[in-house]
Image (cartoon, helix red, strand yellow):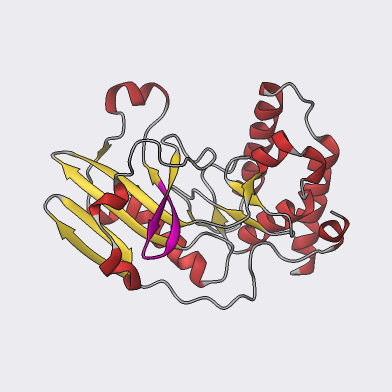
Amino acid sequence: MADRRIRKPPCGAQGVSRTPVVGARWHRGNCWYLVDAPLLGGLGEAHFQPPPGAPAVGRAGRGGAVLVEIAGHAGVLRHYRRGGLVERWLGDRYPWTGLEATRAFGEWRLLARLYGQGLPVPRPLAARVCRQGLFWRGDLITERIPGAESLAEWLITDPPAVDWAAAGRCIRRFHEAGVYHADLNAHNLLLDARGGAWWVDLDRGRIRRPGRWRQANLRRLARSLRKLTATVGRPFPDSGWRRLLVAYHEGGAERG
């Protein structure tokens, strides 16, 4: 515990050698696939259709996520699904406006770009988009980050162990790179026990110029934390949130 609090690394696995992600695109019938090229031969339709009872992974997006394996790589499969009132009418269907405009392919390509830049995101393994008339359905498989749990899970199971400074440095690093997360919340920010932090579920994320969206990202995370703590009957972690903000602003100062 003490060692983790003393260590102040940049978030994620900066400095770790990474093989660039090279996408290979192919299609079969009404479905298109975008795959990390070395995994092309090991990918099958079964990877996108896990059996009932497949192990679930936290809370990832509205469709949830389950564990899968592709050619020896532990992956996380997430199905794209709408929420709110729209779900009642469209469920997991999205209007077709072109393959590259789909959220599945967009998120895969964004992750590949960020991963190649050394930012702490999971490596994208495969995406699938299936067209049905005027609509499409899709899935995304990313590499699982071993030993990492969401900020929400840390707060529920072991609140004193949350590394708020690591979370703040991580958010700042993404913001300095111009990365906008469309749904930054306590479930999409992962932490491990060694000071590492990652962003996941970057659906509708994009690269933007500096602006007020950075503070909007932080406010969205704060709202998520208030909702979570209220749900489990705990007070909002004021001191932890202050540590996150201090680390966030110090991270900007370190970069000039």
Q: Is residue 253 shown left or right of residue 213?
A: right
- Give percent across and percent down for residue 157: 72, 36
Quarter assignment of residue 155 = top right
Q: Is residue 71 magenta?
A: yes
Name above or below for residue 133 compared with residue 120.
Answer: above
Name above or below for residue 192 compared with residue 13.
Answer: above
Magenta-tinted stretch: 68-77
Q: Is residue 112 shown left or right of residue 118?
A: left
Number of marks drawn: 0
Q: Nearer the viewer, residue 94 or 11?
A: 11
Residue at x-position 28% and y-position 56%:
100
- Give percent across and percent down for residue 198: 61, 56
Q: Is residue 106 shown left or right of residue 188?
A: left
Q: Is residue 162 magenta?
A: no
Residue at x-position 81% and y-position 59%:
250
Quarter of the figure with the C terminus: bottom right
Q: Is residue 254 shown left or right of residue 186?
A: right
Residue at x-position 78% and y-position 30%:
236
Instruction: State whether the magenta stretch is mostly helix, strand or loop.
Output: strand
- Give percent across and percent down for residue 57: 51, 43
Name above or below for residue 179 compared with residue 18.
Answer: above
Quarter assignment of residue 225 = top right
Quarter assignment of residue 9 = bottom right
